Each structure stands twice: as structure tokens, then as C-alpha cells.
């Protein structure tokens, strides 16, 4: 059985480290590294006891702390490289301290932002208005028939180009391709032949809508394991093969 | 047209639009220059404040918007029960503050400062529209550069990025980086 226990949650190893340093009231420039390392590891242990996931970031930090700790135990090495000039002593903690200070800056800035956000959240705005021109008369579109529309369209076309031919449109068939219809078409074809080409499904004047719907049908049928599809090379025709029913 | 009439029209435009309205849009409607509009708006902002009006004009970069004043929240709240929106998590806010001060910035730089992965936080901030992709850094992997949006300014009540509290302010008594034995 797992128990859920509340412990301080930190945003990451940097956050935890800062907390430990602040709690111990120590100078950030002179961190007692072995004490802090010990407390850091203790916290990780606590997390582990509580079945909390310890992310790799914490482990990397633990390793860094241990590395610094071991370097501190060694006699301070002075740079022997002459090209570097002065024999400056390098504190093994320097890099970490720099990072901590950098992090602390943004953490404080984040707290300030939180304050600013809470002030600003107490402000209300007005939704945008729909601008309606009430003086515009409503267009009368009742009592119109297809020949009125055709006349209107022809008038527009005539106006736009003087040489424009008068369109002779009688009726436009609304074509609809539903997935169900296409799937049943494919199934019917496959009853007669075991193998068909994708291009066979389409007519020369097939609309984009029709092509897409057929293509979707094929995907659907593949998913249903009704067919399998092969292609000889890139961009060649799709070959649709009816699959044998699996036992 | 006299100044008073122009100001009245600007107020009407801001009221109707509701959303932040850009300086250049107001200028093109009134057929005057952006500088003239800006001057009028600056005057209006101080007049609204001076007369203790319940509505103020907020400036967000080059846009203006009407809003109530935060100090009246307690009164406005009495109109109905306020719904609470979730404020940002600490992780998201830390990430946001790094992006705000260091933009344009790539994810790995943010992670180097925070010492943790930031994917989740960046995702939240993008979703909320507080940050945006500014482009890509021309180096290996072409990482995405992030920066803050106008919505960020509005959410935190800032006119522009220069109004962010100077980052060095948060560096109190830590400014001596000299590490000596």
C-alpha cells in the first residue's frame, strides 16, 4: 500500500538548494558544501521513502555537489598553466554559486510577476460589440427562382466583361460522396474481382471531394482489415487487394 | 474638429471595440497622425485618472483598451460570485520570468538557468498565449526562440517590456560576484 504524504515541493534541484541555503542562514558565497550536500541527499532519501519520483535533475545536482565536495577536500590547486597568466585560485563552488544567484534573480522576478498578475486580475474589460448597421434595409430574397438568379448572374458577367459569353447553366447537380457509399462501392467491386486499381474507382472528371472520399474509404477498409493495399513504387497507382477472411 | 470632440470619438471607439485597439487604427479612422492620437490618448489617460473615473485607459504596447480599476474589485465582485481562474504554477511563472527578461531565448538556455526540464511550462505558456515563437536560432538543430506577447503585458499590467522591474533589483546584496579565499 502506498501512502501519500505532503512534503515541501521544490521546482527542481536549484530551488531545493536555495531553500537549504536560506534555511541554514549561510552566505551564498561561502557554502559549507559538506553540510549542504548531506541535507540535499537527506531530502532525496525522504523523497524516495515517500515513493516520490526523483527526476534525473536532482541526481545530476547530487553528483555535482559530491564532486565539489571531493574537490574541496583536495589541496587547492593553483593553475600551473602559464599562458593563463595569474595563478588565481579557483573555488570549486564558484560555478554553482554563479548559477544559484542567476536562478535566484529569476525566482524573485517570478514572485514579483505573481504580485503584478494578481493586481491585474482584478480588472474587467468589456466584450467587443457587434457593429450592426441598422439603417441598412433587409434584402428581399424571397420569391426568387433559379431563372431570376441566372439572369442576375448573367447581368454581372456581362457587366464585368463586354465580350463575356452568356453562361448557359440549366441546373447544377449537387454531388455528394459519403464514406458509406464509397465503401459499399468498393466492396461491391471487390465481390467481382479480387484486385482493383485505385484509379479504376475514379472517373476522369472526378471531383476532389470524390477522390478524397474514396481515399478515406480505402484507409477505413484497411483499418477494418477488409483489404490490403500495395504500391509498386512511389506515386504509382494503388492496388487494392481483398483480404482473405482470417479465421 | 476640436480636441474635445476627437477625444469623445476615441472614447466611443475604445468602448465599442472592447479589445485592445491599435494606435494606427484610431489614426486612420480619425484621419489624423498617430502622434496626434497618442498625444490625445496620453491626455485622456491622465484626465481619467485625475477625475477618478471608474474606467481607465490601459496602454499595451501600441494599443489602448478600457478597463475597470483593480482597487474597485471588491465592489464589482458583489455583483455576482466571481469565477476563479487558475493562476500560473510556480514552474510556469519562473519560466515566464526568464523568457520575459532574456528574450529571445531558446529552451535549453531556460533549462540551464532553472536546472530542470521546461517543456511542460513552455507548453502551458504557449497555450495561454503569454509567449510566442519568435523564430529559430541558426545553429545546429535550429532551436525555437521564444518571446513574450502583448497578452503577457496586459496580464501583468505592463505598458511595454521596458516597464518590467529591472532584473538587477532582485540581485540585492549579491552583486559582488568576486569569489576570494
Image (spheres, rainbow, N blue to C red):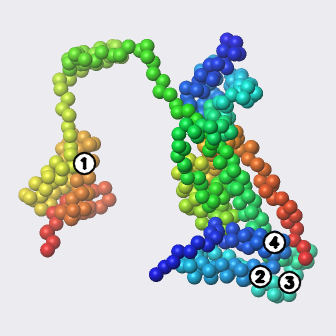
Q: Residue at x 53, y 43 (%)?
A: B81
In terms of sequence position, does the residue under pointer 1 or pointer 2 come before the other?
Answer: 2
Q: Residue B141: where, in percent of width, then height?
A: 58, 61
* Marks 1 & 2 on one chain: yes
Instruction: Name the residue tied to disc 1.
Output: A213
Determine the secondary structure under disc 3. loop
Residue A25 badge:
4
**Front-most of B172 and A90?**
B172
**Residue farthest to the top, as pictured:** B1
Chain assignment, label 3 = A
Determine whether, in the image, residue B118 is placed left or right of residue A198.
right
In terms of sequence position, does the residue under pointer 4 or pointer 2 come before the other?
Answer: 4
* Marks 4 & 1 on one chain: yes
| Disc 1: CA contacts within 10 A as few (<14), some (14-19) or many (>=20) | many
* Marks 4 & 2 on one chain: yes
Chain assignment, label 2 = A
Q: Residue at x 86, y 61 (%)?
A: B173
| Disc 2: CA contacts within 10 A as few (<14), some (14-19) or many (>=20) | few
Residue A80 badge:
none
| Disc 3: CA contacts within 10 A as few (<14), some (14-19) or many (>=20) | few
Q: Nearer the viewer, mark 1 or mark 2?
A: 2
Residue A35 badge:
2
Label 3–label 4 contact, CB within 8 A: no
State the separation of the CA atoms marked 4 and 1.
Answer: 70 Å
Q: Residue B136: where, in percent of width, then height?
A: 60, 53
In terms of sequence position, does the residue under pointer 3 or pointer 1 come before the other?
Answer: 3
Q: Nearer the viewer, mark 3 or mark 4?
A: 4
Instruction: Name the residue tied to disc 3.
Output: A77
Amino acid at each position: 500500500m502506498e501512502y501519500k504524504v505532503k512534503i515541501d515541493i521544490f521546482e527542481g534541484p536549484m530551488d531545493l538548494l536555495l531553500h537549504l541555503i536560506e534555511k541554514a542562514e549561510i552566505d551564498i558565497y561561502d557554502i559549507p558544501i559538506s553540510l549542504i550536500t548531506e541535507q540535499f541527499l537527506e531530502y532525496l532519501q525522504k523523497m524516495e521513502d515517500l515513493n516520490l519520483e526523483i527526476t534525473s535533475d536532482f541526481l545530476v545536482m547530487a553528483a555535482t555537489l559530491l564532486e565539489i565536495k571531493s574537490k574541496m577536500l583536495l589541496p587547492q590547486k593553483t593553475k600551473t598553466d602559464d599562458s593563463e597568466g595569474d595563478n588565481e585560485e579557483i573555488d570549486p563552488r564558484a560555478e554553482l554559486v554563479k548559477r544559484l544567484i542567476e536562478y535566484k534573480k529569476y525566482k524573485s522576478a517570478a514572485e514579483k510577476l505573481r504580485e503584478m498578475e494578481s493586481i491585474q486580475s482584478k480588472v474587467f474589460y468589456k466584450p467587443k460589440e457587434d457593429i450592426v448597421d441598422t439603417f441598412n434595409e433587409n434584402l428581399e430574397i424571397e420569391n426568387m427562382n433559379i431563372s431570376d438568379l441566372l439572369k442576375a448572374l448573367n447581368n454581372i458577367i456581362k457587366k464585368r466583361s463586354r465580350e463575356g459569353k452568356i453562361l448557359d447553366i440549366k441546373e447544377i447537380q449537387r454531388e455528394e460522396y459519403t464514406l458509406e457509399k464509397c465503401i459499399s462501392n468498393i466492396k461491391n467491386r471487390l465481390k467481382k474481382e479480387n484486385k482493383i486499381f485505385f484509379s479504376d474507382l475514379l472517373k476522369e472528371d472526378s471531383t476532389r471531394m470524390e477522390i478524397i472520399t474514396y481515399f478515406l474509404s480505402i484507409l477505413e477498409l484497411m483499418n477494418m482489415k477488409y483489404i490490403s493495399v500495395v504500391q509498386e513504387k512511389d506515386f504509382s497507382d494503388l492496388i487494392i487487394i481483398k483480404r482473405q477472411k482470417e479465421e | 474638429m476640436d480636441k474635445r470632440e476627437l477625444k469623445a470619438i476615441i472614447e466611443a471607439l475604445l468602448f465599442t471595440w472592447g479589445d485592445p485597439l491599435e494606435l494606427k487604427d484610431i489614426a486612420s479612422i480619425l484621419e489624423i497622425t498617430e502622434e496626434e492620437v497618442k498625444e490625445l490618448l496620453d491626455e485622456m489617460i491622465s484626465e481619467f485618472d485625475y477625475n477618478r473615473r471608474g474606467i481607465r485607459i490601459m496602454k499595451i504596447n501600441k494599443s489602448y483598451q478600457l478597463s475597470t480599476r483593480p482597487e474597485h474589485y471588491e465592489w464589482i465582485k458583489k455583483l455576482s460570485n466571481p469565477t476563479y481562474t487558475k493562476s500560473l504554477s510556480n514552474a510556469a511563472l519562473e519560466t515566464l520570468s526568464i523568457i520575459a527578461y532574456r528574450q529571445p531565448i531558446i529552451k535549453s538556455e531556460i533549462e540551464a538557468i532553472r536546472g530542470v526540464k521546461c517543456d511542460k511550462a513552455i507548453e502551458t505558456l504557449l497555450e495561454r498565449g503569454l509567449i510566442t515563437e519568435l523564430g529559430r536560432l541558426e545553429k545546429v538543430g535550429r532551436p525555437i526562440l521564444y518571446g513574450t506577447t502583448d497578452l503577457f503585458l496586459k496580464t501583468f499590467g505592463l505598458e511595454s517590456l521596458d516597464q518590467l522591474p529591472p532584473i538587477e533589483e532582485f540581485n540585492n546584496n549579491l552583486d559582488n560576484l568576486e569569489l576570494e579565499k
